[in-house]
Image (cartoon, grey):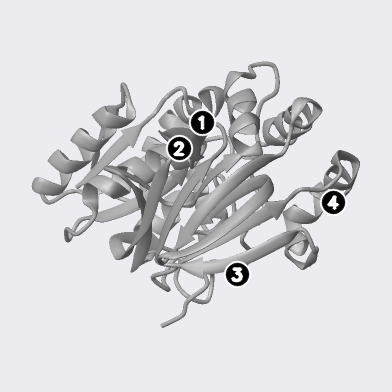
Amino acid sequence: MLSLIVNPSSGGGRAGAALKDVCAALHKRGLEHHVELTRSLEHARELAASAQAAGETVVTLGGDGLIGAVAGALQGTDGVLGVLPGGRGNDLARVLGIPLDPVAACEVLWEGSVRSLDLGQVGEATFIGIASCGFDSEANRIANQTRFIRGNLVYTYAGIRALMSWRPASFTLRLDGQPRALTGYTVAIANSAAYGGGMFLAPDASLTDGLLDVVLIADQPRLQFLRHLPKVFKGEHVRLPAVTVVRAREVEVDADRKFIVYADGDPIAQLPIKVSVLAGAVRVLVPVADRAEALPVSA
C-alpha cells in the first residue's frame, strides 16, 4: 500500500492538477494507494510517520521541501520513500534521474530500486538538497513571494532582483572544527548537486558519501557575478577564482547580519546554524542503475 502525501498548492498548483492522472497511473499499475493532503510540512511529517508505522510505502507529490521533511520523518527506519515531482524546482528528481513528469515518474514506484541516501540536518529539521544563506537568502525570499512567474524561471528572476540591492556579507565558519572566513555572496551546504530548478551549484556533491560539499562564493563586482550566473546551470562556475568548494561532515555558519537559511526552497533556520550530515539516513526508490542520469555513488 502506498501513502501518497500531496501538497496540492506545490508548484503553483502543479501537484494538485496532476493528482487525478497520477492516481490513474497508479491504478493502472495495480499499485494500491490512498491520498493524504498536507496542511504544512509538520503535518506531512506526521502523515509520513503514521504511514511508516503502518508498513506503507510513503510517496510524495510536491516539491523538494516536502521531500526533505518527509525524508526526515523516515530517517533511521526501514520505511521507503517514493518521489513524484510536483514542485517548481524538482531538483532531487533531476539529480536522481526520476522523470520530471509526475505521471511518468510513477514507473519508478513500480520498477525502481531502493537506495540509502544521506540527509542534511539543521537542528531538528532535515533537508535533502542544499541549505544556503547570504545572497541566496534574498533570492529565495523573492522567489517565494513571486506569483506572476511560474516554474523554475522564478529562481533566475529572483536572483537578478536580489542582485540589485545586494551588499557583501562577512561570514564566519567552522568546517569539522577548523575556522574559516568569507566576505562575499553565499555560503551553501550541499547534500545533493542541484537547487533552484536545475542550478548545479555543487556538481560533485554525492547523496551517498557521508559528506557535505560547502560552496563559498566570494565578493566580486555585480556585473561579473551576473555574467557568470549562467555557468551554474552546468556546474562550470566552480572553476572560477571567486568560488571555493570544500567538504566536511559538520559545518557551523554565522554572519554579520541575521540571514534566514533556506533549504529545498523553504526557510529552515536563522543564523547562526550548525549543519551535519546523516549518512545513509533514508531509503529512497530510484531508477534502476542503467537509467539513472546523475546519481553520484562513492561506495
Q: Which of the two discs, 1 and 3, sits closer to the camera?
A: 1
Q: Which of the two discs, 2 and 4, sits closer to the camera?
A: 2
For mark 4, give the secondary structure: helix
- Spatial CA distance of label 1 from label 3 is 29 Å
Q: What residue is disc 3 on?
A: 204
Q: Residue shown at 67%/64% (left/top)?
A: 244
Question: In x, y percent, where is residue 216?
Answer: 64, 56
Q: What residue is disc 4 on?
A: 228
- Spatial CA distance of label 4 from label 1 is 27 Å
To which quarter of the image does residue 112 belong? bottom left
The earlier-in-sequence mark between 3 and 4 is 3
Three-letter amino acid code at the position of disc 2: Leu
**How many numbered marks appear?**
4
Q: Residue shown at 87%/43% (left/top)?
A: 221
Question: In x, y percent, where is residue 111?
Answer: 38, 64
For mark 1, give the secondary structure: loop
Three-letter amino acid code at the position of disc 1: Lys
- Spatial CA distance of label 2 from label 3 is 26 Å
Q: Residue shown at 59%/18% (left/top)?
A: 145
The earlier-in-sequence mark between 4 and 1 is 4
Q: What residue is disc 1 on?
A: 258
Q: What residue is disc 2 on?
A: 271
